[in-house]
Image (cartoon, rainbow, N blue to C red):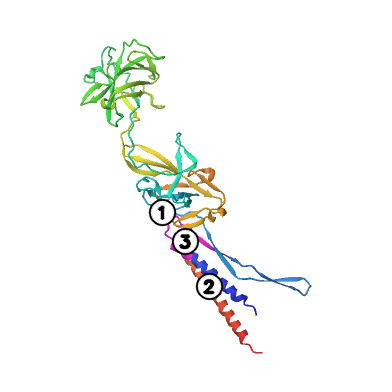
Amino acid sequence: MQATSFFNGVSGLKSFSQGLNIVADNLANSNTYGYKSSRAEFADVLYRELSYTGSDLTTEIDQVGQGATVWSHQLMNQGAIQETGRTLDLAIDGNGFFTVKNLDTEELYYTRAGQFGVDGVVGQEGFIINDQGYRLQGFAIGDDGEPIVGNLIDLQIPVENLPGEATTIVGLGVNLNPADTRVNQVATDIDPEVSGTYNYSSSTTVYDANGDTHQISVYYQRVDDYAGTVPEGGQTVWKASTFETQDGEQVANPADPANTFYLHFTDTGALAGVTDSTGATVSADSIGLTMDFGEAGQQAITLDFAPAAGQATTQVAEGYSTSTNTQDGFAEGGLESVAVSEDGFVTAYYSNGEMVDVGVVALTTFASPGNLRREGDNLWAYDADAGEIWVGQPTDEEFAMGAIEDQSLETSTVDTATEMMNMIIYQRAFQASSKTVTTSDEMIKTAINMKT
């Protein structure tokens, strides 16, 4: 008598026990961020074949199964996105994995758990790390503002203050009123203390090389006896002079007459050009001045009267106004916050109002992500069965990359109801398999006890 049923029953006990282990593992990780549930996949085992000749002289094959086996298959489904409000909590909506590097082994691992923070260890400040201290990988940003895709780097947020930058350009979009009948002679110097010597003024705060601020004002005076070079199309002329507020007083900066220049307008009110204090043509829309900021030294600043399309200085009948007043300098600032855009740009925001893109988060996808090797700690390692690897920027359509959700985490994909149902199924199947073992045991006992 053969005991095949006995061993088949034992294989059933082992298979359903393993299935229950998978269920238990899923349930234990039902609240683990970035966790992907697994599924028990059962298969029959190699058959034993018995051949015999049937009544019609054909060969019949009688196959007897050898039980069942089971293995665990990872289900790489999208988890729900949960907002956390915490900086550097990142979730992936779509395909891809975050890539992190173990500094001790230089090995790369992959994860969907985006609980990142900033390293505070002396000498390693600012690197973005996960709970295990592994560094998040990304791309540097080129001079064109685009990520240098292909070369992974350790993403780092500068923790030191952002140095200030001196102002080099002031953008002014001003409208001067052609209906104003107050007209002066060129020889009449503009005096901020005497209102009759100017028609309009605008002020801009600029920064010197030390990060200190200076208030520069431009005063505009309509004149009717200009005798210098006239740019092509020029019809009307306004004289302008720059002054700096020092101890409550307006002081010419640069010193007179270098602080004076002329704006020329066409008969339609468009800016025809700018000439300097000597009456020579300088440019179509700007003037360069060298200002003296005391201890900070001399500083070249360009006044641009057409800083962008649709923002040029004009002379039309809409009254006086300043629609554009910008400058490119800023004071020193401390880091206030960090944000990550859906396409992976990591941006640092500073107390001086500046923001700096410090890198781009990289995502990695695989031909068969379900075959990655689980390493624990919410990490996967590459396995040859996972196939080809693609590394790119979030939202990259070429590689079907997912998007980054900032201040959010991806929840576990475990469905508790499904796992409870599977638990009942495996329990009943385990009980049934145990019955085949006990029944086979009774049959063997009966055969042993038979007497001849």
Per the rendered image, the range of residues in magenta is: 23-40
Which is closer to the viewer, label 1 or label 3? 1
Q: Residue at x 47, y 61 (%)?
A: 415
Q: Which amino acid does the dot numbered 2 rest on?
A: Phe
Q: Which amino acid does the dot numbered 3 rest on?
A: Asp
What secondary structure is found at the residue carrying circle 1? loop
Q: CA distance from mark 2 to mark 3?
A: 22 Å
User: Viewed as shown, does residue 440 lie left or right of 220?
Assistant: right
Q: Is residue 399 visible?
A: yes
Residue 29 belongs to the span the image colors magenta:
yes
Q: Residue at x 40, y 39 (%)?
A: 357
Q: Residue at x 57, y 71 (%)?
A: 11
The first of marks 2 and 3 along the sequence is 3
Q: Which amino acid does the dot numbered 1 rest on?
A: Gln
What secondary structure is found at the residue carrying circle 2? helix
Q: Position of residue 186 (x, y in %)?
A: 29, 12
Tell me the quadrant of the picture where the C terminus can be found.
Answer: bottom right
Of all residues shown, which one is farthest toward the right? 57
The first of marks 1 and 2 along the sequence is 1
Q: CA distance from mark 1 to mark 3?
A: 27 Å
Q: Are marks 2 and 3 in contact (CB under 8 Å)?
A: no
The residue singled out by tag 3 in the image is: 415
Q: Position of residue 257 (x, y in %)?
A: 28, 16
Residue 132 bears which disc, if any? 1
What secondary structure is found at the residue carrying circle 3? loop
Which is closer to the viewer, label 2 or label 3? 2
- Quadrant position of residue 327: top left
Answer few, some or many: residues within 10 Å of disc 1's Cα (few below 14, many 20 plus, some between 14 and 19).
few
The residue singled out by tag 2 in the image is: 430
Compare residues 219 and 362 and report the one nearer the observer.
362
Residue 61 bears which disc, if any? none
- Quadrant position of residue 247: top left
